[in-house]
Image: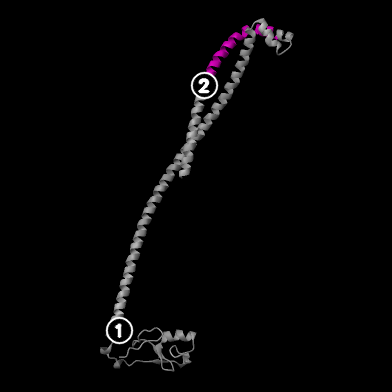
Amino acid sequence: MLNLNCPICTELFSPCDEVYATKCGHMFHFKCLGQWLERSKTCPQCRNKCGERSIIRVYFNLANLDTSRVDIGSLQEQLDNAKLQIKTKETELKTANDQIKSLNDIKKKCMKTITGLDLKLQNKDFVISSYAEQLKMLKARIKVMEDVSKENKALKNQIEAMEGINTLLTASSGEAEKLLNSNMDIKTLATWAATLKRELRACENKKTDMRNLLKVVQTDLHKQTETKKTHEERISQLESENYQLQEKA
């Protein structure tokens, strides 16, 4: 048997193939020749003019086929090439499967890392929220302490004014006259001094109460000052921790 092949695809003709010949005598697969004639109206082999109407089908006489004359070497070469291609594809498939497995392992590790980071982020958000609430409470307390401090300061000013009057009342006439002369008319100040002296006795009890109150206020002021200082240090610490948490997040 002659090993005839299609000049276009170079594949051997088989008895079941549709084979067509041009008017110049060259044979091709019908599909290959049809695709060629769509682009060019010439014979693919000799380039003579050729059209679809001028081609005819060729039928092989199967009775004349002698399988004993088949080209064993050609078939063995094709078989070896096919085995080589299969082996190459298997190697490529194994490599691809290994890559897929490696990528899946990396994906699992990444998912675990992401889950851990999400948990850490949630914990940090909770800590930041807690610090924010504490900071808010401390600011409210500081405001209260500042109001108390202002009130204490006003009371202290009143006490100092009353102590100034008491000093004036307890001073000698010369000292009182000298003190008052530096501020107002002597007669007016003398009248004012006489009035203050008459009221002095009535104010003694109040003076004692105010002194006691001053001591209480001073003690409370000292405590409030210490507490304020402690809270300010705590606020500074919380703000620093809050800033560090935001930087890490």
Mark 2: amino acid: His
The secondary structure that most of the magenta stretch takes on is: helix
Which quadrant of the rendered structure holds the N terminus? bottom left
Q: Residue 74 bears which disc, if any?
A: 1
Query: Who's the residue at 31% across and 73% down the image?
Result: 86
Q: Is residue 140 left or right of residue 8?
A: right
Question: Where is 211 relative to 16, above or below?
Answer: above
Query: Who's the residue at 56% across and 24% down the image?
Result: 149
The percent coordinates of residue 24 (x first, y second) are 43, 94
The percent coordinates of residue 159 (x first, y second) are 60, 16
Quarter of the image holding residue 185? top right
Q: Is 213 contained in the magenta span?
A: yes
Q: Is 212 contained in the magenta span?
A: yes
Query: Who's the residue at 37% across and 56% down the image?
Result: 106
Q: Residue 117 bears which disc, if any?
A: none
User: N-terminal of the two: label 2 or label 1?
Assistant: 1
Q: Residue 222 bears which disc, if any?
A: 2
Mark 1: amino acid: Ser
Q: Is residue 210 left or right of residue 88?
A: right
Q: Nearer the viewer, mark 2 or mark 1?
A: 1
Mark 2 is surrounded, within 10 Å at the Cα level, by few (under 14), some (14 to 19) or many (20 or more) other residues, namely: few
The percent coordinates of residue 74 (x first, y second) are 30, 84
**Which residues lie in the magenta part?**
192-219
The percent coordinates of residue 6 (x first, y second) are 38, 86
SS for callout 2: helix
Query: Who's the residue at 31% across and 77% down the image?
Result: 82
SS for callout 1: helix
